[in-house]
Image: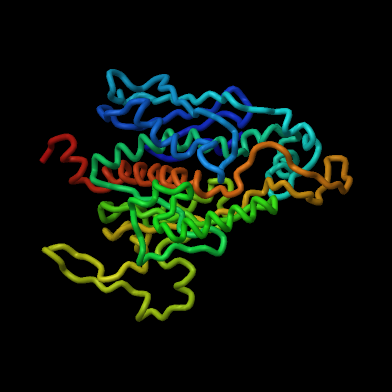
């Protein structure tokens, strides 16, 4: 199976299945000397792990990470960092009734057609469980970027029809409610909306927003490896994402150039923008303004309602999915969006080190 490796210099390779022994990742290209430990990585996995609220699956995974290599006496050694997360709460029998059936909204049909078989236990490699490995790797990327003064703020900005009011934005509120929304009133309204959906055995879509501050100007390349293009690939690689935008996104289609352009001016001897419609990228490069991106997550396809489908014998059937599933994906996906963004930024930051001859000379003390 191809496609489990991401990155050029800061490179990650994930492995594992939803109901296998565990999931894990190998991080290659992390510079030596970065302070890292299991407790730090665990703090990110704890934001993603199931069973934390009434709006997440009741699968009770500890998501305990183990560093297997690449760290000595609390610092990275420059060699590959192997991280492992064991599965401890898989109940495979919950999926026995759908082993021959293609679940609506899932990868079952495509997976079986491509490979000739599929792991029906929770989706196997196609399961959202795989993102635990990405989060563990992305935590290391965020630690690296923090050394450069780069910070991330991530949250749910919309649940179904309920959107946050940016005039009420409270960063401290994000971790005070189970939906990770920075608006207390919106979080309360969204919780009521979800409770009603759960009574109806249904699910909801949502939007996750990430703001990245402190980026140097010039990250990214001008053609295929644009910063926004790499971010789009990273975010769209998250299984449930169906939409992605940066800055004003799709709103730009209804704007005039005179309104969409961000005027430049000087501030304290630096070039800055008066507005940020572009969301922190221009021409494929970071432009020094905060980078603002959004990911639209589809409603959880595993719902407890009868659904029409087809089995692998070509018969039209009806199924009711059992097991433990999130009524909304986005709250646990907030940290996934954040860490996938960090993997892109860390990789481009390292690539940028060799974009100019004078930078290379500085590294080798030739100037």
Q: Would residue 364 appear left or right of 233 to someone viewing this image?
A: left
Q: Nearer the viewer, residue 290 or 165?
A: 165
* Place of residue 346 in the rendered image (x, y in percent of width and height, measured from the top left): 34, 42
Q: Would residue 336 appear left or right of 353 to someone viewing this image?
A: right
For the N terminus, the image quarter is: top right
Q: Which residue is drawn at 18% across and 46% down?
A: 358
* Place of residue 299 in the rendered image (x, y in percent of width and height, measured from the top left): 62, 53
* Place of residue 119 in the rendered image (x, y in percent of width and height, measured from the top left): 70, 32
Q: Is residue 167 above or below residue 312?
A: below
Q: Is residue 258 visible?
A: yes
* Place of residue 339 in the rendered image (x, y in percent of width and height, measured from the top left): 41, 42
For the C terminus, the image quarter is: top left
Q: Would residue 5 appear left or right of 358 to someone viewing this image?
A: right
Q: Is residue 344 above or below residue 187?
A: above
Q: Nearer the viewer, residue 77 or 72?
A: 72
Q: Which residue is drawn at 30% across and 47% down?
A: 151
Q: Nearer the viewer, residue 272 or 187?
A: 187
Q: Which of 192 and 350 is in front in this view?
A: 192
**To which quarter of the image does residue 45 belong?**
top left
| Colour theme | rainbow
Q: Residue at x 49, y 69 (%)?
A: 250
Total labels drawn: 0
Q: Residue at x 81, y 49 (%)?
A: 309
Q: Can residue 224 be seen in this view?
A: no
Q: In this view, does 254 lie above or below 211?
A: below
Q: Would residue 236 appear left or right of 222 to someone viewing this image?
A: right
């Amino acid at each position: 199976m191809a496609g489990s490796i991401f990155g050029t210099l800061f490179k990650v390779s994930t492995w594992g299945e939803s109901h296998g022994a565990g999931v894990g990742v190998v991080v290659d290209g992390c510079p030596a000397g970065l302070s890292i430990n299991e407790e730090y990585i665990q703090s990110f996995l704890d934001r993603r792990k199931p069973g934390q609220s009434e709006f997440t699956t009741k699968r009770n995974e500890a998501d305990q990470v183990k560093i297997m290599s690449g760290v000595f006496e609390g610092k990275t050694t420059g060699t590959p960092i192997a991280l492992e997360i064991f599965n401890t709460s898989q109940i495979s029998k919950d999926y026995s009734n759908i082993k021959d059936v293609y679940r609506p909204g899932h990868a079952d049909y495509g997976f079986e057609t491509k490979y000739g078989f599929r792991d029906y236990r929770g989706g196997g490699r196609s399961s959202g469980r795989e993102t635990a490995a990405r989060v563990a790797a992305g935590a290391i990327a965020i630690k690296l970027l923090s050394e450069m003064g780069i910070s991330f703020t991530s949250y749910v900005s919309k649940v179904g029809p309920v959107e946050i009011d940016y005039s009420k934005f409270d960063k401290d509120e994000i971790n005070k409610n189970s939906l990770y929304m920075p608006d207390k009133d919106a979080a309360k309204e969204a919780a009521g909306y979800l409770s009603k959906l759960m009574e109806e055995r249904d699910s909801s879509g949502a939007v996750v927003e990430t703001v990245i501050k402190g980026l140097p100007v010039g990250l990214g390349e001008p053609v295929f490896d644009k910063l926004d293009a790499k971010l789009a690939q990273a975010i769209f690689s998250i299984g449930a994402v169906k939409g992605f935008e940066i800055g004003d996104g799709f709103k730009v289609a209804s704007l005039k150039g005179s309104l969409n352009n961000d005027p430049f001016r000087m501030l304290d001897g630096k070039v800055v923008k008066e507005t940020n419609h572009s969301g922190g990228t221009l021409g494929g490069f970071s432009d020094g303004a905060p980078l603002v991106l959004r990911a639209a997550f589809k409603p959880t396809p595993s719902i407890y309602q009868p659904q029409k489908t087809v089995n692998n014998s070509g018969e039209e059937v009806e199924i009711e999915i059992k097991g433990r599933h999130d009524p909304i994906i986005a709250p646990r996906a907030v940290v996934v969006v954040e860490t996938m963004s960090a993997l892109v930024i860390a990789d481009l930051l390292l690539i940028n080190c060799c974009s100019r001859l004078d930078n290379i000379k500085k590294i080798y003390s030739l100037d």
